[in-house]
Image (cartoon, coloured by chain):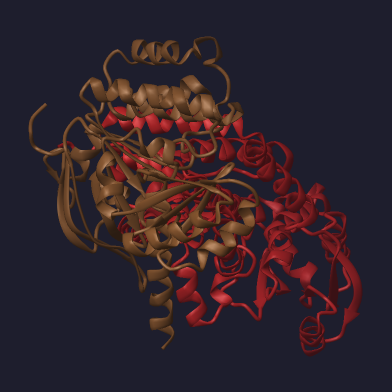
Amino acid sequence: MTDTPAIKVSGLTKRFGKKTVVDGFDMEVPAGAIYGFLGPNGSGKTTTIRMMCGLLTPDGGEGQCLGHDIRREPARIKENVGYMTQKFSLYTDLTIRENLDFMARMYGLKNRRRVVDETLRDLGLFERGGQLAGSLSGGWKQRLALAACLQHKPRLLLLDEPTAGVDPKARRDFWDEVRRLSRAGVTVLVSTHYMDEAVQCDHITYIAYGKKLISAPATEIPARIGLKTWRVDGPDLTGLEAELTARPGVEQVARFGAVLHVSGTDEAALTATVAAQKARGTHHWQEKPAELEEAFIYLMTSAVDNFAVDIEGEAA
Amino acid sequence: MNIFSLARFLAILVKEFIQMRRDRVTFAMMIGVPVMQLLLFGYAINTDPHDLPTLIEMNDDSPTARAVLAGMEVSEYFEFTGVVTGPSEGDRALRDGRANFVVAIPPDFERDILRGHVPSLLVSADASDPTAVGSAVAALQGIVDAALRDTLSGPLQAVAGTSSPVSVVVHRQFNPEGVTAINIVPGLLGIILSMTMVMITSVAMVRESERGTMEALIATPARPLEVMLGKILPYVLVGYVQTAVFLGFAGGLFQVPFNGDGLAFFAGFNLYIVVNLALGFLISTVARTQMQAMQISFFTILPTILLSGFMFPFAGMPGWAQVLGTALPATHFLRLTRKVMLKGGELADVTGDMRAMGVILAVITLVAMLRYRQTLD
């Protein structure tokens, strides 16, 4: 693999009508990385991915993907990219084998029959090749879709919320496969809003309402945000949650099973509040390093606030 | 970078065929609809009506004149409903619609025949409904000749001779142009092809984007031309099957003749199919759902039926409507089929119609290609 980044875009902008869906987006995905693309629903993840592989023409900005210009050479990009759409986009009225064969033909693969046979065997669907793709369960559809976009051995894999609606076991198998591909040198850009998937990524970019909020290696993100977190357990957490939310320095109270995670960026104020609570002796308080999950809930909350301001601004 | 890959084109073609085969309802519609409509219209709409009300203006009550009238009645085209005394009364009856025909036997009819003077038998026809009177008029001279041949036997055989002893003069009232030869079946082929081709193509195209498969398709290196041709060609074959079934039924059940040059028909019909597919493709670039595609397609069918000359004589429409009609591919195909099937037209007779369809095709294809996007914007 070369050192040129697999994807490098800057100032990418896309408008649908009056609405700016992606706004001045910059990103650099190093070759061979597993790159996480996070953000709430409707934040512009899918639009950004589509622009990178030439399915949408950006209204502004520029970039290259696998060394090809995203505006001028979409055909060259498509030959070397595997794009797995959010919605199952193979033909439900074609059999599994027919779908794979169709994709193999579209990429002009040699020894098509052998390639398709191999794919079916790897999938463990060799005996079921004659079954209609539409009759597969969600997990199998996802595996088939991934296999279909890997047949032409792409150098870059774009996965748009690949594990939505798939059970945990299938999700784990899926990620094993993604890591195996990454070791083989394939660059993977994956969009998701599952935290357990986010932690699998080497690098994460968080996008909300078309704007990039943060981009950093996964392990550095909590520190970058500067979030302090305390873990609380004890009786009547619901009552405590309501009470804490109003206290100075507490920006976020999130419940994880039988414990609360209380976080804030203003360390002094938060420490004071916690000290007062500790003095009551009703609950057990423990400081803990902030994790990705708190960091993202924090980002999501503040992004929603930004959006609310935008709406008021428009109304005025 | 190649602009067109045969392999990808074939891939799309094969896929379309598989999908077509699996979609039982659509498949049944492709074959079922033409047969059903042919049977329905073929039997319901009678372009060769019999027992048409006819009035007689009798100026020579001779045996020969009566033989002619008897012959007309036996043919079952004419049903004598009364007698008129003069031309003005006959005209009024035609205008009122009380009669479709007025037959005037001239004075000294029999004597003129025997003297070899070839008298004129004047038949006034209400040609405002050319479909109604067309076939009766066409049969008239034959009927009269046959009737006279039977009467003028024995010593009078010499008079019967080889040429007709009577000239039948048909006076087409209210429509001097006499747009006849309207036959529902060749026209129906144009309408059915248009209906199924436009609808099936537009729906099949929109199905890809509605189901989300278009996203995966254009994420592959497929080119617009490959997608367009690969998706359209299977339906050209459907058009072939429809036409074969249709012509089979038309000839077998309704004895529709095929008088002209098969090659002229084949060329025109291929062009017509392609025009309709292109139109379907254009609609698919506008519609977002299969339902919308269906609605827009249906919208194009009404003008095709009403303004193409299928339902009403083209020449009878006002100028602006003729302009609209000229823009419809069906108009030209209808003329072409009628020329070839009924009037025995050759390739040279239909070049004008072909050219018109070619222009329409070029315009539709241009707009469709401009509208078809390789991206999802």
Q: Looking at the picture, how far across and down is residue B167, in whole percent?
A: 66, 65
In the depicted view, which residue is nearer to us: A11 or B79? Answer: A11
Look at the image and tell me whether residue B276 can be seen: yes
Give the colour chain A carries in the figure.
brown
Q: Residue at x 82, y 50 (%)?
A: B150
Question: Is B126 placed left or right of A246 in the picture?
Answer: right
In the depicted view, which residue is nearer to us: A276 or B197? Answer: A276
Q: Residue at x 62, y 43 (%)?
A: B257
From what the image shows, is residue B86 above or below residue A139? Answer: below
Q: Quadrant of residue A19?
A: bottom left
Q: Quadrant of the C terminus of chain B?
A: bottom left
From what the image shows, is residue B337 above or below residue B174? Answer: above
Q: Looking at the picture, how far across and down is residue B262, in whole percent?
A: 47, 39
In the depicted view, which residue is nearer to us: A145 or A310? Answer: A310
Give the colour chain B carries in the figure.
red
Q: Looking at the picture, how far across and down is residue B266, in whole percent?
A: 45, 41
